[in-house]
Image (tube, rainbow, N blue to C red):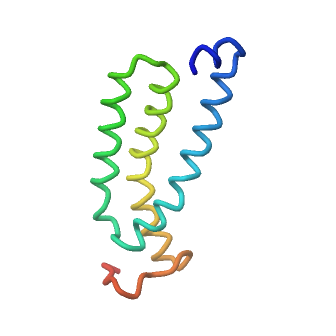
Amino acid sequence: MTEFLSTYHLAGIIIGICTFLIIGLFHPIVVKAEYYWGTKCWWIFLLLGIIGVAISFNTEDVFISSILGVFAFSSFWTIKEVFEQEERVKKGWFPKNPKRTYKF
């Protein structure tokens, strides 16, 4: 696959598309994670990020390594977003989960 992408100079655009899709996928994940578990799920994203970085370091294919790096750092960014999502819920921008108790 890497040969094909290199031959036709498509690696950059495909990595860009994959980055866009990964970031787009993480937005609803943040909303759902905060809704069901609150901010106490942040460590899951930390673990996913560390695993993504470790696998990226051990992958020789530049394309796969890049996608894993994007996934890893999107996971790290999600930690921040989960806490910000709690603030959005507090402001009333997103619904509260009626089955959960909130600190605020």
Which residue is found at the position 48% from the left and 35% from the top?
A: 70
Q: Is residue 92 above or below residue 67?
A: below
Where in the figure is residue 63, as x and y percent of width and height? 52, 23
Q: Position of residue 1 (x, y in %)?
A: 58, 21
Pick the front one: 7 or 89: 7
Give the quadrant of residue 58.
Answer: top left
Q: Quadrant of the C terminus?
A: bottom left
**Above/below status of 51 relative to 89:** above
Res 82 quadrant in image: bottom left
The residue depicted at 62 percent of the width and 42 percent of the height is 20
Residue placed most toward the observer, 11 or 42: 11
Q: Residue 28 appears at what percent x and percent y? A: 53, 62
Residue in the picture at 44% in, 46% down = 77
Front residue of 86/28: it is: 28
* Relative horizontal placement of residue 7, taking residue 47 as reference (left or right): right
- Front one among 16 and 81: 16
Residue at screen point 34% across, 50% down: 45
Q: Position of residue 15 (x, y in %)?
A: 60, 30
In the picture, measured across the screen, residue 59 lies left or right of residue 19, that is left
